[in-house]
Every structure is written in C-alpha cells, then in structure tokens.
Amino acid sequence: MSLLARLRPTEREVYELAIRETDPRLYSQFTPIARGFPFAVLALLGLGLFAIICTPFWLLRSRR
Amino acid sequence: MSGLVDLIIVGSGPSSAQAAKAAVERGLSVTMVDVGFEDTAFGQSVPDRPFDELRRTDPDQARYFLGDTHANDRHRRNRVGSQLTPPREFLKRGVDELLPYESSTFFPMMTLALGGLGAGWGAGTLTFEDFELKEAGLSWQELEPYYREVARDIGISGGLDEDTAPMVLNIPNVQAPLEFDSNAQSIFSTYQHNRARFHRRGFFLGHSPAAILTEPLRRNGLNRLPNSYRDMDFYSDHQRSVYRPRFTVEELTGHPKFSYRKGLLALKFAETPDRVNLRCTDVETGQSVTVEGRALAIGAGAINSARIVLSSLEAFDRKIPLLSNPYNYIACVNLRMLGRPASDRRHGMSQLTGVQTIPGQTPPDRTILSIYSYRSLLIFRLAREMPCPTFLGVQLARLLQTSFTIVGVHQADRHTPAKWLELRKRADGREVLAGHYEFSATETMEYRRNLKRVLSNLWALRCVPVSVLSPGPGSSIHYAGTLPASDDPRVPFKCGRNGKLNGTERIYVVDSSSWTFLPAKGPTFTQMANARRIVAGMACVLESR
C-alpha cells in the first residue's frame, strides 16, 4: 500500500465522519471557513505543517 | 390498446422516450418495453427545501445524504457509479443479475431504471458541430430540425451570445442561461478579463447548455418549474426543473396510442414477413412474454442494444466495435474564491462548459470541460481523500470548500481494434457480454497532450489543479458505435444511415449504437434528436407498407 493510501482515513473513520456531518446539531463544525484570503493561506500552511509533523505518529497508529 | 402495434420500443432512456414521443406525434401506435425500476426507497421523502436549510435542521438527513447502507461498496473510490447519491442508487438495481457482463479493462455503467441513464443524467445538452456529425455518420442539415424539436419538448437553457455557443449550443430560442454560483462567477470573470489571451490558446468558456428550466414549461398536464437554486439536483427531482426521460413516458401514458409494458426485459427479436416478435422475460415472475409489432426500435443504450442484436442473431464470440469518451476529472482550488464566502443560492449541475481546441488543427477535435462547484456532496467525501487524520481533513475541507472546483474532462473517441464487445455463451447456456478497451500509444499521447493544455488553461483561470483522477475506461458513461452506420447494406452488425439494422426489414436502432465517432461532447441531446430523425423516416416507411 502506498504511503498516501496508508495516510488516508479508513472506511470506518469516513463512515463515522459522515454520520457526524449529517447531524444538524454539529452543523457549525462542518460549515465553510471564510475569513478572507490571507487567513485561508496561513491556515492552510499551518494545517499542512501540522499534518507533516503528525505523519509519523499517524502511520504508527494506522499500523496497529 | 389492442391488436398489432405499429412500433415496439425497447427501453425508456432519452433516445427511447423521444422516439416514442415522435412516433405518437406521427400517429403511430407504440408499445414501450422496459424493466423500468424506480426509486422505491426514497421517493418523495427527500424534503423540498434548500440544501443548507436541510443540513441545518433535518435530523433525518443521513437517510438521503448517506443512504441506509453507507458501509457498502457504493463509497469505494474511483468506481463507475460510486458518484451516485443514495436517491439515484436505483439506477444500479438488478444490473449484475439481469445484464451479465465481464471485463478487466472496461467498466461501463448500465441500468434498468425507468428513464435509463437519463434518470441520473447531468442534463448537459450540447449540440454536435457539422464536422463531428459527419464523422459520426450524421449531418447537421438532417439533424438540426430535430435538435429544435427536442429543445422545445424538454426545455433547454443556455447562453446563445457566448463564445462557446457556435460550438456547443447552435440552435435558437432556448431559455435564458442558469445563474452562476459565486465560484463559477469568479472563474467566468477571470476568463472575460483575459478573453483574447484564452482565444489565442484555443480556449473558450460559457454557461453550460442544460436541460434545466429557467422558465416554466406547461402543457397537457405537464407542469415543470424553473430551477429554484436549492442545490438538491443530485438528490431529488422536485419541481421537475431538470429534465428526466420518465417525464416524457408519464406524459405519454394515458395517450390512446401509447402503452408502457413495465417489468419486461427484452431478450431477442425475430422477424416474420409482416411483423416483429420480441421475446422478453418478466423480471418478477421469470415468465417468457412475446410482444408483437410492425417494427422494432431498440434504444437500450449502445451496449445493451448490441447485446440484444448479438443474442437475436446468435452471434457468439464475434467482436463488434465500441466507443466511449476518455474521461478524467481534475480537482482544483479556485484562488479567487479561497477564504471567501459563497452564496447559498446555487444549482448542483455543471456551471460552466469549457471548449479546448487546438488552433489550426484539422479535423478540429474538441476537448470538453464541465466545471462544477463542490458544495452539495458533503465534505466527508473530500476529507476521505486527504492523506491526514480526519480531524485535520475536515478543517482543510472547510477552508477549501467555497473554492473547491471539479472539472470533468471529456475527449473524443474513435474506433480501433482494441475496443470491442462480444457475446459469449457459457456451458450452462447463459449469455454474458464481454468488453475490452485499450488505448493505442498514439491515443494515449494525444490524450495526455490535450490534458496538459487543459491544465495550463486552468492555471490561467486561477484554478490550481491539486489532483488529476482517471476513473478508467467506461467512466464517462458515454457509449456509442457498437453497430456503426455503413453505406453498404450487406455488411452485418451495422446500421444504415436511416438507423435500420443491416440484414433486417423492421429492426431499427435509435440510440448512439449507429455512430461511427463519439465527439467529446455529451451525446444525450444528439441521441434524442437522432432518435426523432430515425422515427420520422421509419414512420414514412410504415405508412407506405
């Protein structure tokens, strides 16, 4: 399995996410974040960096 | 309706529905034979309210947004049909069992639903140009009046004064185009600011011509309303703004010259000097049923029309050609919308149609882009593609959602010996259709080159491509050319220009099976116009007998 495929969420995780997303009480957790271009760029960079840092731990967790 | 009908029509998809309408209008009696599975799980249970309101308020939304069996194979990545929303899942019902098919290279989508693949159609109504029609074995002069007839019948909207109109919507008197959503508006304004530059690069952009109403369409009990921009087009047919072939079947039902035989799977035809016998099986009871008529029009889609013909002529292990548009989709981020809010008022279908040409090329092949804004398909589908934990994926998807754009890229297809269908007979007597589809090295090179041009123009539109997905042969859901037209009436498994199957007297093929070329443009509108053309000719023949 490729590294990218291993990093992707499992079907179970996707299922749980889908159930949460279709719960109207959690609606605000899934609405678009629209706070302007600079915020979006900074947030994407921050999340990207965080994702890279998380990767080894995520892979270890996925192997279990 | 009793006695021998003038015409039996197989299937209820776009071609068959228009063939039936044209035949009834010309005074012919028609029996439509169809399995006609319908949506029994969802029906009208999807509330007639805007997407965002439902997301905010409806505690039962998981039922129609996710379906009852979310964990099944529907959500496996990159499978043909995996894009269907739960209320459209009935399109796949009974297919594996009743339409046996095998292949390791070509995975078409087939259906036994009422309305055929038109029940889940994206409603694109692009006209072919004269050079495309000629290569497909048709002609603009012959087809143009029927394009107009279909447009009047189903209701078409589009921009007639746009750069793309001469290439994709070359007929007058259509309804005003649909409103763009925020994302499409920003892409279109980028295009307009740099129009001359895009034209030099052979790229044109405009509203998507679509069988979606922007004005009401009312006649004989038919009441269809303009699109209300509720973004539920993938989930329900409320207000009937988006045309579905079943509307035509419903409109015809009750007409004294029309009967609809539901639950029958057409298997084989046989001709006698004065009639056609169509042997069918009742899908509920398994009993054999024979339907008789003066002529037969097969409109079961290019793949299943071929299956019926091969089975009727007992032509096993004989290869016949096949066409299907190569298809890719590109996930993009529209930089001009990144971090910006988007209006909730939008429709879910293709917002923009792009035409990529190669300046100076002869024949001038087109590559067609359908540009969608990603909103109503929920963000879990985005998060599952992201190589990170779901909590991070959700935040990324929320940041990208208003700017996320999906571009479907269709390319033209021509016959080669490496694209074929054949009917095989198993030892147990079961007939199985087999398919094979492979690109030649030249085709692969050409498709890659075209895709590169598209990617370069997406960058110029400020849409940054983040992923190019190739769902594989068959995923375009555009099929044709299995019984191609030939001027020599002696060649078997081909059709005449009038749609009549060679070697027969009363068998006509009214879908895209008879085409000799498949342009990159969605074929449905042309299939419907061509079905009307064939029926008009057939009606004259039947009258003279």
Image (cartoon, coloured by chain):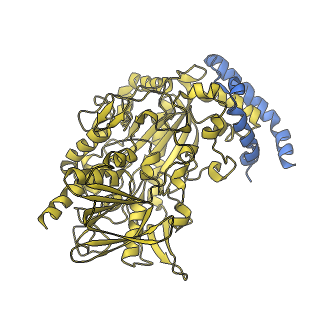
Chain colours: A blue, B yellow
B488 sits left or right of B56 in the view: left
Residue B401 placement: quadrant: top right
* Residue A44 shows up from this direction: yes
Q: Position of residue B416 (x, y in %)?
A: 40, 65
Which of B11/B476 is in front?
Answer: B11
Which of B3/A59 is in front?
Answer: B3
Above or below, B270 relative to B243 = below
Q: Position of residue B283 (x, y in %)?
A: 49, 65
Q: Tell me which residue sits at (63%, 29%) in the image.
A: B58
Q: Quadrant of the N terminus of chain B?
A: bottom left
Above or below, B452 relative to B445 = above
Above or below, B94 relative to B452 = below
Which of B355/B459 is in front?
Answer: B355
* Residue B362 shows up from this direction: no
Q: Quadrant of the C terminus of chain B?
A: bottom left
Q: Tell me which residue sits at (69%, 38%) in the image.
A: A18
Residue B268 placement: quadrant: bottom left
Residue at far left of view: B544
Residue at far front of view: B2
